[in-house]
Amino acid sequence: MLKTHRFLMSYWHSLNPHAPLSTQHPISYADRLRMRLPGDAKFALGPHVDGGSVERWDENGYGLGKVYDSVWKGRWEDFDPWESSCRLPVVSDLHQGVGAASAFRMFQGWLSMSTTGPFEGTLLVNPLLAKATAYYLLRPFFSPKRGVDPGAQTASEAITNSEKFLASNNWEMDSKQTSWVHGATPGHGQELSHLLHPHLKLQESMIHMPKVRPGDYVAWHCDTIHSVDKTHGGKKDSSVLYIPACPMTEDNAKYLVRQRENFVNGTPSPDFGGGIGESEHVGRIKAEDLHGLVGDDGCRAMGLKEWDSDATGLTPGERVILDRANKVLEFYD
């Protein structure tokens, strides 16, 4: 998994070669196990984006890193979702929503524990990464001229799908802004729908994962719109381990300190806390067991062994962040 995460995160780049982060030294992020049984319709997550919602428009959220400045300045074509240095100052959980990630996850992902295909409780994603992001960011600033009743926020489904309604000449920038941000609510992820975001044509543009088997890994960029099947129409369980890919950053090192403490105590990870977890389980894995199971790299990713900041081939930014991480993790003063 660590090798896979290094490969995935190599697609990111930094405009600042001295930025204190490393994609070659991933940390662990203990998320959750999902078990979905045949016929289940309760775990029906519609199209959404994690990593906050209103924070994307907030100067004290994503604005701290000016992540979307090119979009706000009218140069949406210049938006680069793969630039990493601008993400370092971001606060994505200003409102501490349930399930909000306080760590920087470059990719979300899951490791399949079962054989699952389309319509069997699996994942769907929207492949229009940069364009879809720019669209839903700008959506609150525009309204249709025709096709909606006065004061209405959305049109009927039939009108929403019509070419006349979607035509560019039917839309104009609002002269008066409101506090309504389409699909964004404090304390929740960014929700999307074909009524609120008609040009995305989500009923057609959400794509199923192909058939996966136990051990297959699925990953998607942290800005990607994703959802799950409304109903699990298969005959066997659809079970996955959520395992995102997280780079080494100072904030992620701080998260690792909290996660390490919870692991030692046998309680759930900080972002998904609550309950006694495995603290009373007999024979549960403990810190002293890990080296024999996962080696030095695995122990470092868990915050249980110091990083080698003197290793050959490190960039200046990598050397700096590994030193900082070792201090945060209290391996030396």
Image (cartoon, helix red, strand yellow):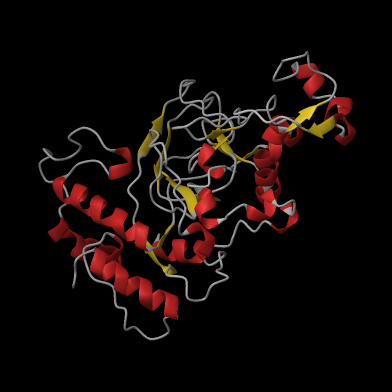
Q: Is there any visible trace of residue 127 in the rendered image?
A: no
Quarter containing the N terminus? bottom left
In percent of the image, x 20 and y 37: which residue is there?
277
The image position of residue 81, as x and y in percent, is 61, 56
- Using the image as rendered, state which of residue 149 and residue 84 is in the foreground: 149
Pick the residue in front: 311 or 215: 311
Residue 125 in view (yes/no): yes
Q: Residue 25 appears at what percent x and percent y?
A: 38, 68
Residue 164 image position (x, y, % from top left): 89, 26
Indicate the quadrant where residue 309 lies: bottom left
Q: Is residue 106 left or right of residue 1?
A: right
Which residue ends up furthest to the front in the rendered image? 176
Left/right of residue 88 with respect to residue 292 in the rendered view: right
Q: Residue furthest bottom?
A: 312
Q: Is residue 201 above or below residue 42?
A: below
Camera-side residue of 215 and 16: 16
Nearer-the-camera pick, 288 or 246: 246
Which residue: 74% across, 55% down?
77
